Amino acid sequence: MKAREAAFRVTGALGAAIGYGCLLGFLYVVGVQIYRWFREGEWTHIGMDDGLRVGLQHCCVKGDVSGRLAALMRWLDAPVDWLGMHKVLEVVPASLALFALSIAGNCLFIFCRDRLDRR
């Protein structure tokens, strides 16, 4: 196996993991929204900022810590600058972002598979 083929295999696997992982995340977010809609009778908006906040809490930021990710967490809660970016993260649905990442990951996977099949 040549280095180029190995690079295409690794990149394809990474694209597949991103693509299908984000697709599962998309289905989870939409499922939670549908569940809440059936339960409460009102559609719950889950923005990208909500997803980032939950991801940072479960993954990286625990308690009162310092660092860049903790600063990002504080910025998500109370932005002081980059107010336009915060508004975009607030308005864009997390499900849309996950679906777009899923498509991008699958495109990368298909591209790498096509390159390997040509050889």
Image: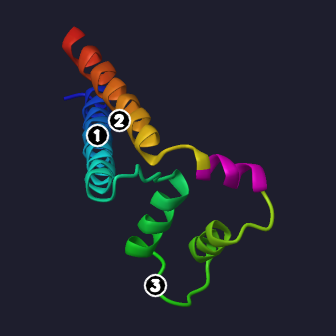
N-terminal of the pair, mark 1 or mark 3, is: 1
Q: Amino acid at mark 2?
A: Ser
The reply to whether the C-beta atoms of the residues labelled 1 and 2 are less than 8 Å apart is: yes
Image location of residue 97, percent across then percent down: 46, 41
Q: Which residue position is annotated with label 3?
A: 62
Image location of residue 40, percent across then percent down: 33, 59
Where the N terminus falls, by quadrant?
top left
Is 15 drawn above or below residue 64 in the view shown?
Answer: above
Identity of the residue drawn at 60% across and 50% down: 89
Circle number at residue 52: none
N-terminal of the pair, mark 1 or mark 2, is: 1
Seen from the viewer's position, the closer of residues 104 and 80 is 80
Q: Which residues are magenta?
A: 83-90
Q: Amino acid at mark 3?
A: Lys
Q: Is residue 113 left or right of residue 26?
A: left
Q: Which residue position is annotated with label 1?
A: 23
The reply to whether the C-beta atoms of the residues labelled 1 and 3 are less than 8 Å apart is: no
Whole-number angstrom distance, CA of label 3 to CA of label 2: 28 Å
Badge 1 density bin: few <14, some 14–19, many ≥20, Cα 10 Å: many
**Outermost residue to the front:** 41
Badge 3 density bin: few <14, some 14–19, many ≥20, Cα 10 Å: few
